[in-house]
Amino acid sequence: MDGIVLKWASYLRTVKRYSPHTMTAYNQDLRQFFTFLQKYKGGAVTLHMLKELTLKELRSWLSDRLAMGFSPRSTARALSTCRSFFKFLSRAYQYDFSVISLLESPRIKQTLPRPLSVAQAKSLLSEIDGYASEPWVGLRDCALFTLLYATGMRISEALSLKGEEAAAQDHIAVCGKGGKTRIVPLIPVVHEAISAYVQACPYPITASTFLFLGVKGKVLSATVAQLALRRYRQSVGLPASVTPHALRHTCATHLMQESSDLRGIQELLGHASLSSTQIYTHIDQRQLLQTFTKAHPRSRSD
């Protein structure tokens, strides 16, 4: 099956244009599925074995994942992986693998993002530089987190930017998931923060180098950026939910509160589906309900 799996992976990478992180997750999911089948069926996984799978056997796989402690969200992704693989086999080998479509995905409890308040976001961007080991590193962190909050970028998108973006005045092109490019507007405060960082950086930042650099002059890693934010939040007593990705949620939530322009926010964030953006309407409604409950005279006991 190794050759078939490689062809499937090539299809996902070149046709579907999945990211390396997604590819790694899908590969792990499929390998776990194959490991279960080898133990359950007592032999190597073959096309014929997959073709003869029953709904009962597939349900046994889900039960096995539950017993192993996999979360419903992880299992839902694994099921999506297997559906993708079986769909590929159906097209490539003209076999009927429709049995997997009868398998219900586990229910996932919907959790809402936990954005920062406006005050917390302002405090973060005005104080984060004071928690860095060197002044230029503080300016870098300030520029990075200002960019994330102002544009709603993913941390991976921001760290992949090249130095040529430092000269951008009002917008930049961002390469997001699936290799899709979108135009993201820049407000003056972002341009000012990036300019201050570039001028202070001891390493040359050119059009061909990465914009955000680490202390050794190489591209800044997401782990280092997360550690910088962790030091800050622990020092000021913010919850663990304050992460670089939370700034993306914060940007979307604050824009929703001010404009309620779902379509515009979808384009800014690079969501493929509007349903992904609609989660921020639920956050806004929740906050509205909390405000109403505190303010309405009949909600208070006399």
Image (cartoon, helix red, strand yellow):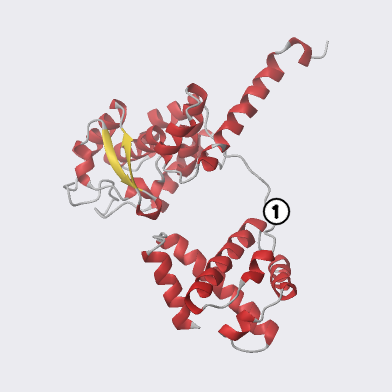
Secondary element type, mark 1 = loop
The picture places residue 105, in percent across and down from the top left corner, at 67, 59
Q: Is residue 125 left or right of residue 163?
A: right
Q: Report the residue that reaches farthest toward the bottom.
A: 43
Placement of the C terminus among the 4 image quadrants: top right
Q: Is residue 197 left or right of residue 88?
A: left
Residue at (40, 52) in percent of width and height = 177
Q: Is residue 167 visible?
A: yes
Task: Kindly identify the amino acid type of the residue bearing the numbered disc 1.
Answer: Arg
Residue at (39, 41) in percent of width and height = 153
- Name which quarter of the figure residue 295 lies in: top right
279 vs 193, nearest the viewer: 279
- In this rendering, the answer to whether 156 lies above or below 141 is below
The picture places residue 207, in percent across and down from the top left corner, at 17, 47
- Name which quarter of the figure residue 146 lies in: top left
The picture places residue 241, in percent across and down from the top left corner, at 55, 41
Q: Is residue 114 visible?
A: no
Residue at (21, 45) in percent of width and height = 163
- In this rendering, the answer to whether 139 lies above or below 51 is above
Q: Report the residue that reaches farthest toward the front.
A: 94
- The residue beneath circle 1 is 107
